[in-house]
Amino acid sequence: MTAFTTIFRRDIKLALRHRSELINPLAFFVIVVSLFPLGLSADSRTLLQLAPAVLWISALLATMLSLESIFRSDYEDGSLEQLVLSDHPLFLIVLGKVTAHWCTTGLLLTLMSPALAISLAFPPQNLDILVWTLLLGTPTLSLIGSIGVALTVGLRRGGILLALLILPLYIPILIFGASAVDMSIDGLDVAGQLYLLAALFVLSLTLAPFATSAALRVTLE
Amino acid sequence: MTAFTTIFRRDIKLALRHRSELINPLAFFVIVVSLFPLGLSADSRTLLQLAPAVLWISALLATMLSLESIFRSDYEDGSLEQLVLSDHPLFLIVLGKVTAHWCTTGLLLTLMSPALAISLAFPPQNLDILVWTLLLGTPTLSLIGSIGVALTVGLRRGGILLALLILPLYIPILIFGASAVDMSIDGLDVAGQLYLLAALFVLSLTLAPFATSAALRVTLE
Amino acid sequence: MSEFFHMGGYAFYVWTAYGMAFAILLINVVVPIVRRQRLLRDLRRMKSRKTP
Amino acid sequence: MRLFRFFHRFASPREFFRIAGSMIPWLAATTLLLLLIGLYLGLFVAPPDYQQGESYRIMFIHVPSAWMSLFVYMVMAGTAAIGLIWRIKLAHVIAMSSAPIGASFTFLALVTGSLWGKPMWGAWWVWDARLTSELILLFLYLGVMALYAAFEERRTAQRAAGILAIVGVINVPIIHYSVMWWNTLHQGPTVTKFDAPSIHPSMLAPLLIMSVAFMLFYAVVLLMRARWEVLDQEQRSNWVDDYLEQLSP
Amino acid sequence: MEAVQGARGDRVLFSSLSFNLSRGQLLHITGPNGSGKTTLLRILCGLLTPLEGMVRWHGHDIRSSASTHRRECTYIGHRDGLKAELTALENLQVNARMSGCHDTKVINDSLRLLGLWDYQDLLVGHLSAGQRRRLALGRLLVKRAILWILDEPFTAIDIDGRDIIEAQLISHLQGDGIVVLTSHQALSRPQLRERCVTVSLQ
Amino acid sequence: MEAVQGARGDRVLFSSLSFNLSRGQLLHITGPNGSGKTTLLRILCGLLTPLEGMVRWHGHDIRSSASTHRRECTYIGHRDGLKAELTALENLQVNARMSGCHDTKVINDSLRLLGLWDYQDLLVGHLSAGQRRRLALGRLLVKRAILWILDEPFTAIDIDGRDIIEAQLISHLQGDGIVVLTSHQALSRPQLRERCVTVSLQ
Ligand code: HEM
Ligand SMILES: Nc1ncnc2c1ncn2[C@@H]1O[C@H](COP(=O)(O)OP(=O)(O)OP(=O)(O)O)[C@@H](O)[C@H]1O
Ligand SMILES: Nc1ncnc2c1ncn2[C@@H]1O[C@H](COP(=O)(O)OP(=O)(O)OP(=O)(O)O)[C@@H](O)[C@H]1O
Ligand SMILES: [Mg+2]
Ligand SMILES: [Mg+2]
């Protein structure tokens, strides 16, 4: 556990030191969401129809763009090889880093989402479902993303390759998340989708750190 | 001109050396475009309504994500400071790099766009307008983007900050591009928008390389 | 015979499908053969460079 | 025990190269024969469908290639896992040689599916669960291939792409059960139902024969690819020199 | 404590290399540029897998007894492994905690010893090349492993710094530690030279 | 050919430093870690602006006559400025062409001289630390500038390589060139030492 907390606190400290980076994913989320009304000739009915998809896709892209920060800078300055060589279980270290990443992106995005949703003519009584899907979905995004980053961190300009690798894995989460929000607007029951999202979260929580550790050991060779 | 061609050829060679990287922005474009029908419960009428915005926003994001490759790796391995110190005008070098970037992203995206448009139920007779807007718009995106990259290249994890800086500048292009496509579907005349896009292109072609050079000199200090 | 090629009005779909299938299977056969030639050529060249 | 010893020998690159080389001609001949029979039965013997007319003949390539797209993925992930756990080089070679073949089957399933969908559903493409997940499968294959190509060192590339292949396995059950979990446009299980298949024998026969032919085709192409990959990988060993000598006196 | 070895990339760098080290010995690996020194060190610390053969530690293959080996070994490579956004002190604290040392006195002493006491609150990004290298070597002082593996520890370090580090190497060897290092310059202290085994690549 | 100077970050590293260099001279800048050697070199080549004072080249401030100064000066910093995805040869070709040299003979000679002839088709990412450093120094041979500014040119380079480079420095000085370098080790050749001016920081 020392490993988890040390790394978690280190990464949070690093994020706080650059306060601008902390708000960057947030700002990106806000900007992309507001691109849509601009690109469309928008009236509020079409907007509402789009709102779930736009919110979820923007959250997904914001997470994805910030993923690299989990390992890239550690790789470049050589800290990563030191972490791999440390005598703590690597998956705990990975878990610490992923948790820190989620706290500085997914969690903040989720907290931010109600305000943006309202701007897209989203009905206030359904905000809770939106927040729940994001709360269950974004940690899964960070966890799966960490596998992709670990696989590409040794490559120069891995950025877009990373997107290619993990987007296919993100799609199911997007579909469940967005359709749950969509259905809740239509007044349907969405417990099933929420359970599925929770199941995906638990699954990735138990498996992803191991896959990530294995990937790190391979790519550092 | 030696500087321009040398750098252009060097960068194209670098891109070709990693053939997978060449198709990466393309793959990203394809994937993001297909995220939308997934996130929406889509029938072909809503899709068509969305198509222009989705295509343009995806092209914009694909360009944006690949922007870093213009300067980042040169910065990290120290080539950039050597280029800045070389006795050729820096703006020619910059222009060579940006042109190479556009050839490997914007141009390819544009060539790819008709196929994707068809999958979004886009009417075939309007494809030419879509291609024209992209052909005029994407070089502007690369040019403006290079300023942003030059400003952020000295920062670690500049990725999202970059997005934040250049998205506001991208918005006018997005609006003209998407609305031209949108209007052409409705059978309206779009010559005005196309002239505007062309004007923006010429403007950025003459100004952006200088701004980028100045930015590089500042951030390298 | 022409009726066979006509495929009850679905000629385009059916024959494109079969054509694509044929093309893709063929590519899968050709690629390893090309690779074989190139590999053997490279290996021979490398060996001849090593021996003298 | 004999079987085990066979596999053990087979896993040595040199033996694999030899045995595979001698197996390929036979397998290829069988494949060709089955393909011809399948095509004959499918195009000439089988009667038109009472609902879909002649267009259903696309099935004889669509369904085998769709099945193969899933099967090849499982082979790829399985061999990748074997390679990672027991550090067997040949397993990695098989996994990485499977990826492009699987990708082409997936692509074929997508293309033939949409060629079938246009007359049946009136659209080239709809975003329903099975179609989407098959598209994701294509992206997964492409991802594995791109990752494999991105590394310079072969061993690292194989292992990294192998991990990705294993992670992507989750998609396979999603594709297979998608028609049951969500109500979609796509056909439910007609052939693979556990009780009697709900399809006429004169249509079933060519379908099964084509499926076997595709399977054998996969084996042939896989062995061909894997042989040259092995030769490349082992280029420093003596047996490769011997082999080259033998080829060009 | 180690045995036979292998290669890198497509070309074999060294083959059937084999040596044994016992407590209190220093192994100096020399060789021209590109002879495979870094490769060898990374194999010794378990970051690379040898093409053939294996590395033994206490008689066991390091791949099977990875956790013991990792606990008892410190590797310092070409790169420093420091976070530019944290201060010198914070970096050393994280490194200490990750290797099980929670004693602030040890950390403070190390900073003083390395001549970084006055710079402890500076961000590492603002330190000079040599100061950073010193801080990286601070890992050795807070972890107290048996086996030290150092890849050109003296790069960018001035003469004073070199002196300090060689003194540390001597006391480590006297305390029954083992050191493996590469360096293009000869070792200056006689106490080091007498305990030194040299392996030349190519 | 240069004059007064300034500082870095928040702290002033050196002030009212001033010196003149004439053709055929070598300036060796020494000083402990963190004393501002890198900072000084970057000021000399125009990458940093001095806090106060200015650098003169042929009597003109280098900020106003930047293009002459850039043409006649080559800087090699801590980092090598090579593309890992291009081969050694391609890297040198690009560097040569950017500095106006289109002669393949010069390029080939440089590769041979640096001992990289056999490695010319290897990707730079696969070269060792020392081989990369040698290739970076190849810039000096293809550009033929008057002023060479070298930040620890000998890092990671073996004894042979050091010899080769020192020989180049000598012939450059004999051809009326100017060299400014930092290095923690003393120069070994007497021909260099006799032309050498030393500036110690702090
Ligand atoms: C682009 C469009 C299509 C795609 C991507 C697609 C994909 C697939 C896949 C992946 C399977 C294998 C499922 C499994 O074994 O679990 C399959 C099977 C099948 N498909 Fe399609 N399909 C498409 C269009 C169609 C159309 C238009 C039809 C007919 C109207 C059709 C009829 C069938 C049939 C009959 C099976 C066999 C089902 C079984 O017994 O398991 N498909 N398809
Ligand atoms: N970007 C920066 N911002 C603020 N201060 C800096 C920055 N870079 C360096 N410094 C400060 O300047 C001082 C001198 O740095 P410099 O890199 O010039 O030293 P140096 O003489 O080259 O040392 P070394 O021998 O270790 O390479 C350092 O002590 C550091 O505190
Ligand atoms: N990632 C890699 N892929 C392929 N080959 C590599 C790789 N890294 C190094 N090599 C090769 O291995 C050889 C030895 O590299 P290594 O870094 O071990 O040398 P070294 O002895 O540490 O040299 P130096 O003194 O220059 O640091 C190099 O000549 C290079 O060709
Ligand atoms: Mg080395
Ligand atoms: Mg310095």
Image (spheres, coloured by chain):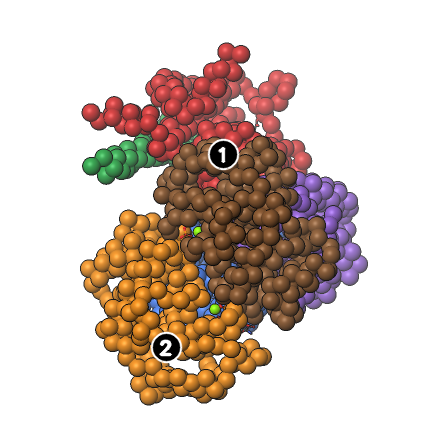
Chain colours: A purple, B blue, C green, D red, E brown, F orange
Q: Quadrant of the C terminus of chain E?
A: top left
Q: Residues within 10 Å of mark 2 (few under 14, many from 20)?
A: some
Identity, as a three-letter code, of the amino acid under mark 1? Ala
Q: Which residue is rendered at x = 65% and y = 51% of the image? A: E143
Tell me: E183 left or right of B165: left
Q: Which residue is mark 1?
A: E3
Q: Nearer the viewer, mark 2 or mark 1?
A: 2
Q: Which residue is rendered at x = 58% and y = 55% of the image? A: E168
Q: Residues within 10 Å of mark 1 (few under 14, many from 20)?
A: some
Q: Which residue is mark 2?
A: F197
Residue closer to the observer: D179 or E89 = E89
Q: Return the chain for callout 1.
A: E
Q: Position of residue B155 (x, y in %)?
A: 54, 67
Q: Quadrant of the N terminus of chain E?
A: top right
Q: CA distance from mark 2 to mark 1?
A: 50 Å
Q: Position of residue E128 (x, y in %)?
A: 53, 68
Q: Which residue is rendered at x = 40% and y = 86% of the image? A: F3
Quarter occupied by residue D93: top left
Residue closer to the observer: C18 or E113 = E113
Q: Is residue B43 visible?
A: no
Quarter occupied by residue D54: top left
Tell me: F24 left or right of A212: left
Disc ID at residue B96? none
User: Is disc 1 placed on a helix, strand or loop?
Assistant: loop
Identity, as a three-letter code, of the amino acid under mark 2? Val
